[in-house]
Amino acid sequence: MAYRVMVSERPGRPLIRCERARAALPAGSIRIKVGACGVCRTDLHLVDGELPVRNDVVVPGHEVVGRVIELGDGVTRWKLDDRVGVPWLAWACGTCDYCRRGRENLCERALFTGCTRDGGYGDEVVADADFVLAIPEAYDDVQAAPLLCAGLIGYRTWAMAGPARRLGIYGFGAAAHLIAQVAVAEGQEVYAFTRSGDVAAQDFARRLGAVWAGGSDQAPPAVLDAALIFAPVGNLVPTALSQVDKGGTVVCGGIHMSDIPSFPYEILWHERVLRSVANLTRADGEAFMALAGRIRLDTVTVPYPLDRANEALGDLRAGRLQGAAVLVP
């Protein structure tokens, strides 16, 4: 039986639609009928050739929501028609030093959905049964798709920042619009930084509870306790450091960023912390899905038919999206 996919055959080229024949299902895996797949900035980096590691030919997409239509040998955790989500981390070895220390996100042999393993830009996807997540029932497929990366990576980035009464968020896109709602629900003040002059994004941030919104070239009205950077712009690192208080933390939440310019030690001094986030763990996924079940998040989405995946990527590349693009096969 054949199914449709959108394939990245070479970095820098548009995706190509093609049909594939079903392969035998490996033991421990499940086959999923895709209901929706989010379009993430990581997909854009992959298609544009900005990621150092990827398969030569790969189906992108790692924010996948769908129903189980086939079970591989040995799968007992799921049953047919269960609704599941497929995130970025597709597999980890469980035996390397990182895995043994509970840091499977740094696994030496990890595989990643839509990058080193085919993802969800298609009608079907195969996933390791131990690395998929249950989806809160309060969200339909399109609403749930951004939770699988924008939500998960946003959550890990937010958690890495630690306690912060005043939280700055640079780059108000898919991840930021979700984690801002979490932060507000948890009693934090959110200060949103957008592209200079992007009034629509600033209004959007205020509607989601931000106490202030302005351009990334502006100073907020209060000193920040922590800042999260989701925009892939290295120049924002010294900017954010200059806005956080003594002992504050700046967390870079993206997989790719342009070069960080040199900056004076003075803005790092006084025990400020600069750190990055890489991938996620299954524990992150379970914790965030539980939180998303408790705090009803408004996932602002822009649906596209599967065949318009290149258009969705183009709108993301050009900054024309408010919220998250989602492909619907």
Image (cartoon, grey):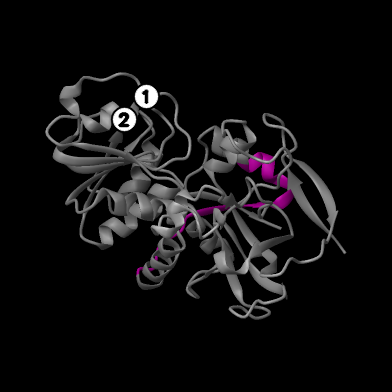
On the image, numbered disc 1 is attached to which residue?
260
On the image, numbered disc 2 is attached to which residue?
237
| Coordinates of residue 41 in the picture (x, y in percent) | 53, 41
Residue plotted at (60% across, 37% down): 53
Tell me if label 2 and label 1 are in contact, CB under 8 Å: yes
Rate crowding at label 1 as few (under 14), some (14 to 19) or many (20 or more) other CA atoms within 10 Å: few
Residue plotted at (71% across, 44% down): 58
| Coordinates of residue 36 in the picture (x, y in percent) | 63, 60
Count of picture labels: 2
Is 23 magenta? The answer is no
Q: Please tell me whether residue 30 is drawn above or below residue 193 in the rendered image.
A: below
Residue 91 marker? none
Q: Please tell me whether residue 217 is drawn above or below residue 134 in the rendered image.
A: above
Q: Nearer the viewer, residue 5 or 318?
A: 5
Which badge, 2 or 1, is on the more N-terminal residue? Answer: 2
Q: Please tell me whether residue 282 is drawn above or below residue 247 in the rendered image.
A: below
Q: Which SS class for mark 1?
A: loop
Q: Quadrant of residue 75?
A: bottom right
Residue plotted at (68% across, 69% down): 30
Question: The magenta stretch spans which residues?
Answer: 295-312
